[in-house]
Image: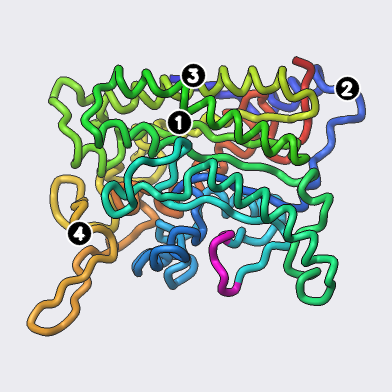
Amino acid sequence: MESPYRSLFGVVTWAILVLPSGSISSCKFPAIFNFGDSNSDTGGLSAAFGQAPFPNGLTYFHTPSGRFSDGRLLIDFLGESLGLPYLSAYLDSVGSEFSHGANFATAGSTIRPPNTTISQSGVSPVSLDVQFVQYSDFRTRSQKFRQKGGLFEKLLPKEDDFSKGLYTFDIGQNDLTAGYKLNLTTDQVKAYVPDVLNQLSRVIKGVYEEGGRSFWVHNTGPVGCLPYVLDRFLVTRAQIDKYGCATPFNDVAQFFNRRLKQALAQLRKQLPFAAITYVDVYSVKYTLITQAKKYGFEDPLVACCGHGGKYNYNRFMKCGSKKIINGKEILIAKSCRDPTVKINWDGTHFTEAANKWIFEKIANGSFSDPPFPLRMACHRTDQ
């Protein structure tokens, strides 16, 4: 597992040594364009298939907000740190505002197009290639409508926002678990990872060809520490590490991450004007989960919102699920009393408190390659 613990002083020193004199300035990102899955979905799946039910949104928004969490996600904290509003989901037609970017992520999305329906596997039909088509169409049509002025001019991004904006990617986790749902072995899942990353690379190249220049790419987290993985898939006692996580699943995630890092290094050579940052969220999340008590959290492998079982997770009774009892609708899968001390929200996703902690660790560049802080992610080093 990569653990590039670096001090902020070290990051800045490295930048001073590598970057030309006078170029070390904070980037002024006017917009964010996000591609991803449920880790960064701010309402896409909810708009298409129905709102993520309460108690999702409990902590911060105090109402369902299209996010599979009690509050804000990493993408929300990222936008806040850049002084930008929360991203509206591209698919959400109600109350959306795109002047500072758009979010194409949907929960359940994969990089590779799925060969099952969402009702069969839970995988979203809005895979990364579809998200890119949506982005490309949005880029073209937004400018045509913006020329009409009035409300369109206020709600849509400027043309140069697409070249000056930050392109964020947080996707790949569902590609790995999809193989296990088909009863593939760990080696079989690893075998298709190169194809998954080739398709990711094609999309990044596509965005680059349309003018995108700054890319902030998260690797995938320790899926073997997620309650839904521990509950759903067969894992032997010998495959559980000392922290309670499933080793085979984390091994696959780390394999994916090593290959992702290599793929991005290759893209830097191929795309001469692109600034591509690889962000090791795996190490941060694994540290938080395995040292939860040290950082003020508890029961890292137990979901806050759920119903029953060792991990408070039941895939047939997920967070927000209700039952009719004696003619009355009763919320069965409830939130825990205090989500602020929990890491896992619903068996699959992180709580706002955990997301905030994770973002604070990755924002300064300590877990990035190259090790630039988020605010310097528009800078490219000589390859």
What is the CA distance from the residue labelled 3 to the residue labelled 2? Answer: 29 Å
Taking the image as shown, residue 55 lies to the left or right of residue 144, namely: left
Q: Quadrant of residue 243?
A: top left
Residue at 49% x, 69% y: name it: 61
Crowd class of label 1 (few under 14; some 14 to 19; many from 20; radius 10 Å): many
Residue at 42% x, 69% y: name it: 64
Taking the image as shown, residue 107 lies to the left or right of residue 267, namely: left
Q: Which mark is drawn over residue 73? A: none
Q: Which element is circle 1 on? A: helix
- Tell me if residue 188 is in the magenta stretch: no
Residue 275 spot, x, y in % from top left: 73, 30
Tell us which disc is closer to us: 4 or 2. 4
Residue 98 spot, x, y in % from top left: 68, 62
Q: Which mark is drawn over residue 317? A: 4
Regarding residue 225, the answer to whether it shows in the image is yes
Residue extending farthest to the left is 326
Residue that badge 2 annotates: 20
Residue that badge 1 annotates: 282
Q: Which element is circle 3 on? A: helix
What is the CA distance from the residue labelled 3 to the residue labelled 1? Answer: 11 Å
Taking the image as shown, residue 33 lies to the left or right of residue 194, namely: right
What is the CA distance from the residue labelled 3 to the residue labelled 4? Answer: 35 Å
3 and 1 marks in contact (CB < 8 Å): no
Crowd class of label 4 (few under 14; some 14 to 19; many from 20; radius 10 Å): some
Q: Which mark is drawn over residue 258? A: 3
Q: Earlier in the sequence, mark 3 or mark 1?
A: 3
Tell us which disc is closer to us: 3 or 2. 3
Residue at 64% x, 56% y: name it: 102
Residue extent of the magenta highlight: 89-95
Crowd class of label 2 (few under 14; some 14 to 19; many from 20; radius 10 Å): few
- Tell me if residue 93 is in the magenta stretch: yes
What is the CA distance from the residue labelled 2 to the residue labelled 1? Answer: 31 Å
